[in-house]
Each structure stands twice: as C-alpha cells, then as structure tokens.
C-alpha cells in the first residue's frame, strides 16, 4: 500500500496517490459531505490509507465535520502545505484558508487554481485513496474538475425524491461524458426510524435511487437512513463511523465502502 504510483485513470497523476474518488451530488443539501466523510473513514477501517479533499469551495464543511474547524495547515518550506489530520485521515480544505463566516466569491478560474494547488502542493504522502468532496451540482466547475483531476471513479449521493434523482441523473451523465467511471449511487435520508416506537417512515419516499440506478445501469451502493445521530455526529465533528463503529449506521457506510474499495 505504501508504493507511490500515479492514479490509473490517465491524465496527470498526483504522485503518491493510488486512487482518487469523487463524491458528488446533483444538488446541495443531500448529505454529500456527510457521506464523503463517513465513506472515507469506512475505507480507512478497511485498512486503506485515506485522505479527504474538500473541493466544495463555496461551502466547505469538512473542517467542521472532521472536528478541525479553526485550524490551519502549516507550510514549513513556504511552498507546500502539510495537510491537517483527524481520525488517522489527512484532510485539506479551502475552509482552512478562509474565515468560516466569509463567503468565497472567486470566479471559476480562481476556484480551479485553488483546487489544483490543493491537489499538487499538499504533502499528501502515500495514499491508497483520496476522497474528493465535490462541489454540488453539474455545472462548469464540476465538469472541469472532473477533467483536470485524474478520477478513478465517482460516487453519486441522492435523496429518494424525484427532483434530487433528476439532478443525480445529470451528475451521472456528466461523469460519463468525461469518461469517469460511475461507481454507483448511494441513497441518503432513505428512511426515518422513530427512536420511540421503531416505526419506519419514508419522508422523502423510498427506493427511488435503487430504481434509478437499475434504469441507469449503475450499481446501487446502499441506503443511509435519516437519523439524528448521523446529523449530530456529522455536524459535531465526530463522524459516526469513527465514534460509533458498532452502530447499524456505521455498518451501512462500511457496506458502501466494501462495494467500492
Ligand atoms: P451536502 O454536502 O450535500 O450539502 P451535508 O452533508 O452538508 O450535505 O448535509 C446537510 C445536512 O444534513 C447536515 O446538517 C448533515 O448533518 C445532515 N445530514 C446528512 N445526511 C444525514 C442523514 N443521513 N441523517 C441525518 N442528517 C443528515
């Protein structure tokens, strides 16, 4: 695992990183970052060395979700950055470089420049997998990112309702257009289990992503329930896969990780 090899998908590899995997969504707020973090930590539990790159430049949430808010990466040589580390995972985010309450107002080329730097000028070291938390949506930024970064594959996160699925379909087609293999679809906020009575409610519908995945001939990677513990651990910087490894939710993320490893 320690051998430095460029990514296999062609283009310019990033030295030392074996596979770069994008976690993407057709729209915001579907739980893409939460999934990216827990999936990355699940891959680590499977024995891989893992890094996470927050490419969601307009709404970077990884510093908070990894419990690293307010910290800054160091640059001992003045040229490259040492990524921060949490839960045995290297983390880089534009959120470390701008104040949390300041909006990022850059235009496309500046965003691309910043992302390129976060790939090339960060001391990632030898990694089996770099998980990239993509900006939500399927616009120009996402397209050029998918072209510039040598992606080994993409995971699409969607909630079950039609509108989110429609957007997920656009995302899937975008990756196919630039020849990035789509590893499959994860259905997030799949069902709500009442903590009092155990009743299962399908707030956003249910099974939509599975049906869509089969229609689009892409693997269905699993469903993650809508659960207060997932939200609290995610927003509190204590991701559930790491802090409650024996919970059924952690098992759900691990099962997704097993399918894409
Ligand atoms: P995105 O990256 O798609 O914008 P986030 O991962 O930031 O979405 O999630 C949006 C909000 O929903 C966050 O507060 C997060 O904690 C919460 N959330 C995400 N997935 C779940 C889930 N399965 N159950 C409960 N809350 C969730």
Image (tube, rainbow, N blue to C red):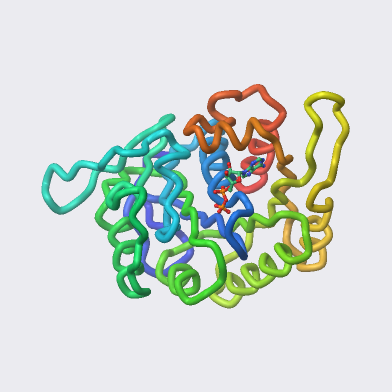
Residue ID at (54%, 28%):
242
Q: As drawn, is 56 to the left or to the right of 216? A: left
- Farthest front residue in view: 101
Q: As drawn, is 9 to the left or to the right of 200? A: left
On screen, residue 176 above or below 100 = below
Residue closer to the observer: 9 or 138: 138
Q: Quadrant of the N terminus?
A: top left
Residue 29 place in picture, x, y as percent: 60, 54
Residue 145 place in picture, x, y as percent: 44, 68
Q: As drawn, is 154 to the left or to the right of 129? A: right
Residue 21 place in picture, x, y as percent: 51, 54
Residue 141 place in picture, x, y as percent: 45, 72
Question: Picture quarter containing residue 110?
Answer: bottom left
Residue ID at (64%, 30%):
229
On screen, residue 151 above or below 48 = below
Residue ID at (42%, 65%):
149
Marker count (numbered): 0
Residue closer to the observer: 231 or 22: 231
Residue ID at (73%, 64%):
165
């Amino acid at each position: 695992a320690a051998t430095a090899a460029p990514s296999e998908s062609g283009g310019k590899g990033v030295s030392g990183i074996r596979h770069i995997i994008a976690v993407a969504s057709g729209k915001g707020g579907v739980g893409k970052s939460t999934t990216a973090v827990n999936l990355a930590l699940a891959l680590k539990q499977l024995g891989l060395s893992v890094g996470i790159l927050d490419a969601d430049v307009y709404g970077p949430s990884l510093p908070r979700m990894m419990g690293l808010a307010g910290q800054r990466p160091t640059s001992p040589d003045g040229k490259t950055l040492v990524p921060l580390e949490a839960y045995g995972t290297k983390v880089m985010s534009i959120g470390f470089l701008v104040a949390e309450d300041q909006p990022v107002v850059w235009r496309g080329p500046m965003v691309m420049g910043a992302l390129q730097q976060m790939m090339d000028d960060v001391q990632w070291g030898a990694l089996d997998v770099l998980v990239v938390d993509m900006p939500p949506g399927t616009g120009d930024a996402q397209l050029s990112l998918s072209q510039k970064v040598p992606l080994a594959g993409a995971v699409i996160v969607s909630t079950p309702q039609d509108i989110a699925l429609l957007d997920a379909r656009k995302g899937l087609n975008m990756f196919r257009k630039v020849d990035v293999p789509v590893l499959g679809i994860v259905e997030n906020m799949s069902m709500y289990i009442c903590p009092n009575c155990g009743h299962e409610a399908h707030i956003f519908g249910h099974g939509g992503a599975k049906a869509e995945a089969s229609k689009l001939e892409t693997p269905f990677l699993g469903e993650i329930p809508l659960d207060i513990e997932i939200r609290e651990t995610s927003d509190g910087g204590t991701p559930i896969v790491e802090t409650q490894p024996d919970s059924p939710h952690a098992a759900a993320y691990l099962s997704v990780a097993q399918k894409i490893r």
